[in-house]
Amino acid sequence: MSYAIIRNAKYTMDNINGIYRHNERKNTNYSNKDIIKENSINNYSIKKCNAPYTKIFKQIKEENNLQGWIKKTSNIACEYIITSDKDFFERIGEKETKRYFKTAYEFVKNFKQLGEEYIISAKVHLDESTPHMHIVFIPVIHKLDSKSGKVVDKISCTEFWKGKNSYSILQDNFYSYMTQAGFELERGNKEENEHIPIQKLKQITYYETREMFKDTQHLEQEVITNDNEVLRENYKKVINKFNTLSKRYTRIKNIVDETLYKAEQIEDENIELKNENLKLENENETLRDYIEKTFECISILFEYPKEKLKSIVKNFWNKIK
């Protein structure tokens, strides 16, 4: 069974134009060797973007009067990468593949009430080994302003992805939406491996892979006989072994998918912590400047040496601690 796959990435203003050049195939050379440049003519847009993402971002922000305090380190755009496996697309064919990506686009429009107007670009790539779609959007939340009583649209990546299980909710909703649209897909068992440590996951994966190859060694030996009963028994063994291996493969696939998911969650949390630390550092620097200016003012006001004043405050503080 194939999987409904949706991944999310976050970008600051500094790096979204690089994503634009990649998605729209504006680069001359690519490190990704899967890209077959002569097939790029088959790529198509569900929502076209004819200018760098920064330009479109500013245009959408101005047209919709989007609120939100944007700093240099702020994530101002997100990107969904939507796909399944190669066999799935080969099985459903070209027409259904187009419907798959169109349906996924409709999901993104409606998920968290985003709105199509905040989608910057939706590009389907057919020039790599597996078809996939890049959807770049502005993470806009719709908040009720307590003063005016009106709904205000605000750019906030942090609030859009609020909650430790936000990524899991995205995957659950995407899986449900796509299967209800008639696509036969599977959602990996997210609970089975939820609390398994990374080292244990590696051990399980290694063991399962080793056992899979060990169990297939005797199947490579060709059975040469005219005895139908022997052939029938051998056929049953092959089918049973195939079913066993299929289950093991599914288990390995689930473990790998869940590991990738957790790694992305940790990366997102690390970025948020770094941004929070930077914010605290700035606040501490501001507070230090404020205290220094306060000492200077008091020193001038009372005509008392600043360093002696600091010493008095320090001694007092040490006594009350």
Image: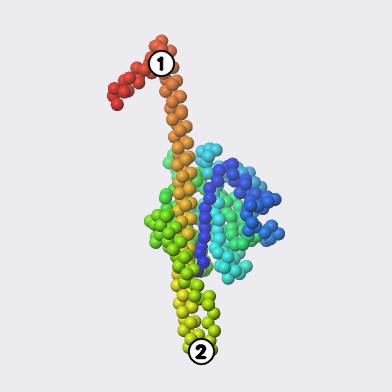
Which quadrant of the figure has residue 304? top left
> Measuring 55% from the left and 51% from the top, which residue is drawn there?
79
Residue type of the residue flagged with mark 1: Glu
Residue type of the residue flagged with mark 2: Asp
> Measuring 45% from the left and 33% from the top, which residue is drawn there?
281
The relative height of residue 169 versus residue 63 in the rendered view (above or below) is below
Residue 53 coordinates in the image, percent (x, y):
62, 46
Neighbours of disc 2 within 10 Å: few (<14), some (14-19), many (20+): few
Neighbours of disc 1 within 10 Å: few (<14), some (14-19), many (20+): few
Q: Identify the disc placed on residue 261.
A: none
> Measuring 46% from the left and 28% from the top, which residue is drawn there?
286
Given residues 97 and 29, the one toward you in this image is 29
**Tag in front: 1 or 2:** 2
Tag 2 residue: 227
Is there any visible trace of residue 217 in the rendered image?
A: yes
The relative height of residue 215 versus residue 67 in the rendered view (above or below) is below
Residue 181 coordinates in the image, percent (x, y):
52, 66
Which quadrant of the figure has residue 109? bottom right
> Measuring 47% from the left and 36% from the top, which residue is drawn there?
278
* Dots 1, 2 in contact, CB < 8 A: no
Side (left or right) of 172 relative to 123: left
Given residues 310 and 55, the one toward you in this image is 310
Residue 315 coordinates in the image, percent (x, y):
33, 19
Q: How far is the residue under mark 1 from the one under mark 2? A: 103 Å
